[in-house]
Amino acid sequence: MPRSTVAEFTIESVRILDEKGAVDEELVPSLSEETLIDLYRQMRRSRRLDERAIALQRRGELGTYAPAIGQEAAQVGSAAALDTGDWIVPAFREQVLYVMRGTPLHKILWYAMGMEEGAEIPDGANVMPPSIPVGSQALHATGIGWGKALRGEQAAAITYFGDGATSHGDVYEALNFAGAYDAQTVFLCQNNQYAISTPRRVQSRAETLAQKAVAAGIKGIQVDGNDVLGVYAATTEALEHARQGNPVLIEAETYRRSMHTTSDDPSVYRSDEEEAEWEKRDPITRFETYLRSEDVLDDDRIEDIGAAIESELEEAIARAKAGQSEVDPVDMFRHTFAELPPVLEQQLAEYKVMRDE
Amino acid sequence: MSDSNELRIVEAVRQALHEEMVRDSEVLVYGEDVGIDGGVFRATQGLIEDHPGRVHDSPLGEAGIIGLGIGLAATGLKPVPEIQFQSFLYQGFHQLQQHASRLRSRSRGTLSCPMTIRTPYGGGIRALEHHSDSYEAGFAHVPGLKVVIPSTPSDTKGLLTAAIRDPDPVVFMEPTRLYRAFREPVPEGEHVVSLGEAAIRRTGDELTVVAWGSMVREATDAVDKTGVSADVIDLRTISPMDTDAIVESVKKTGRCVVVHEAPRTAGMAAEIVARITDEAFLYLEAPVERVTGYDVPVPMFAREEAYLPNSDRIATAIERTVGF
Ligand SMILES: Cc1ncc(C[n+]2csc(CCOP(=O)(O)OP(=O)(O)O)c2C)c(N)n1
């Protein structure tokens, strides 16, 4: 029997807003001025939060912190495409998603101060807590998306993970289960080119990460992750598919412009030239240029937005520091089970005796 | 490599790896970020330059890292993978439990898995969530695995060398908190500390304290604080355990306190108490106390001090036991 081709696949790539701030008019999503400004504001707020958090960490006021500098378009653009009923299942670098779903900024700082209080989720926010074990959260999103399908609800789940996570069994299992169960799930891979020090090419020989969807029988698509409009459009489309029971994997090609976490020194594994190259493709600058050209933004407006963010952050930092003194270790006993089992009651009593001595 | 023979634990790890790679061309180091970055704790720093082709950055997947090691070992290599944090070894646990640990028994002795999995463990460094676990009891519960936890630089080199040379899989847990805590002289060149032998850090006749890893220093400090004359046993190998060292000491002292930072329920202390009641019950003059973490997920760092046993907590238990 001669050999024949039984299946063929292609991976499409999307970009709407280019590096110079020019758009492909045919593809631009129609968004109100208010929404455009909100996308811009969220990205800037995310950037400044990260910058302030890094500075606080350097002064010993925070623990390890994972900034998303450079990835704002991938995060904000995709989250902005969601309905409030859609679930967000983040990894550990998506502070802005919590803010977009109503977590006050001081709580983001509490989490970074090692306080569980910071992970508290506002009622009805439909967000999962941060997931530190890489890739493990993708399965939760499949579960939510499947649950939505079983219940006949229109909502979807979106999960976030990095390029490194695509090597993880959990991520493949999540994609595969999602396909098999018609889960209403979108997988957003932020390919920021590195998993700590490990470059994308060491992670996998696959030409794109989007094609990891192929083996699971679901759709995979690439998008310029530094193009907030492109990410918004690709996610909107993916959500439409997902709500019909057709999960989608989006690979957003972006770059982590700062360190992996505050414990990391990127100069060990990447060059100044490479960093300079990506600086030119910065998602915020690019969008700002576009909004100026559309007369949505001007110097005054930009300055106002910046000033409002600064004062909001000042207030949040002060509030975070003030709340820090209220850490009560007893909390760790209270929240392990719904009801304190006798063995923990005894350990709690033991702890209190010790604390009060 | 450091020129001085006064080393920290992290440097002792590096020296042991380096020397074993020089001695045995089959030794292979790989794992997440262990190459160019030298590992997130820099334990493998410089190895990639000294041993080209034998140190590899791996894709991010713990099951893959452990599973690959089983195959590498089957080809005659001696894999020494790093799992970046012990808390992520759970993601390779099925490979460890279902394959690595029983390759020998399932192949009736024809195959083996001489893999040494190095992994930092434990709290006290203000790390992120999921970075501070101490799961030695879980690994010790797996037949066919050895579990080793050093507490000093010299032992680190000696035990790691022994682990790499051991014909069976070893989980080698390095106390993160002690990586850079202090230096001590470490023998240059060949230095092997046999697996399965505890060390006596202090000797005394009123009480036995058993600890390992980062708890050894807390236990020793507690003994010093109370002025009680105590044997302090540093278990060093969690599995197989040096039961004799514990039993002999308890027969002499009649009292015992066991310390670990892992949660209490089904922790290693429970196993140690069981062995003491098996073999030295009639010598006991007081109940054996356990000073451990609580049965809650290791809290984030704003509460971790409350969770981790410290010398004060241990001292209280010592006094209670001695005064029983
Ligand atoms: C299962 C697991 N293994 C290892 C780690 C340690 N670790 C934290 S982040 C990271 C790299 C993640 O890379 P990627 O998935 O690309 O996401 P990024 O950090 O670039 O956003 C590693 C190895 C972890 N948190 N979880």
Image (cartoon, grey):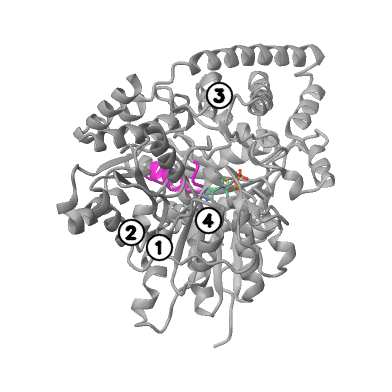
**Residue visible at 48% across and 38% down in the picture:** B129
Mark 4 falls within which chain?
A: B
Alpha carbon separation for disc pair 3 and 4:
29 Å
- Residue type marked 1: Glu
**Disc on the earlier residue, 4 or 1:** 4
- Foreground residue, B250 or B289? B250
Residue A109 disc label? 3
Residue matched to label 4? B83
Alpha carbon separation for disc pair 2 and 3:
48 Å
Main secondary structure along the magenta-highlighted residues: helix
Q: Are marks 2 and 4 on the same chain?
A: yes
Few, some or many C-alpha atoms within 10 Å of disc 2 (few <14, some 14-19, many ≥20)?
A: some
What segment is highlighted magenta in the picture?
A132-146
Q: Is mark 4 within 8 Å of ligand 1?
A: yes
Q: Is A284 located above or below residue B173 in the figure?
A: above
The single residue placed furthest to the left in the displayed view is B282
- Give the side of residue B164 with respect to residue B292, left or right: right
Alpha carbon separation for disc pair 1 and 2:
8 Å
Element type at marker 2?
helix
Q: Is A61 located above or below residue A202 in the figure?
A: above
Residue matched to label 1? B197
- Kindly report which numbered mark, 2 or 3, lies closer to the viewer in this rendering: 2
- Residue type marked 2: Ala
Alpha carbon separation for disc pair 3 and 1:
46 Å
**Disc on the earlier residue, 2 or 4:** 4
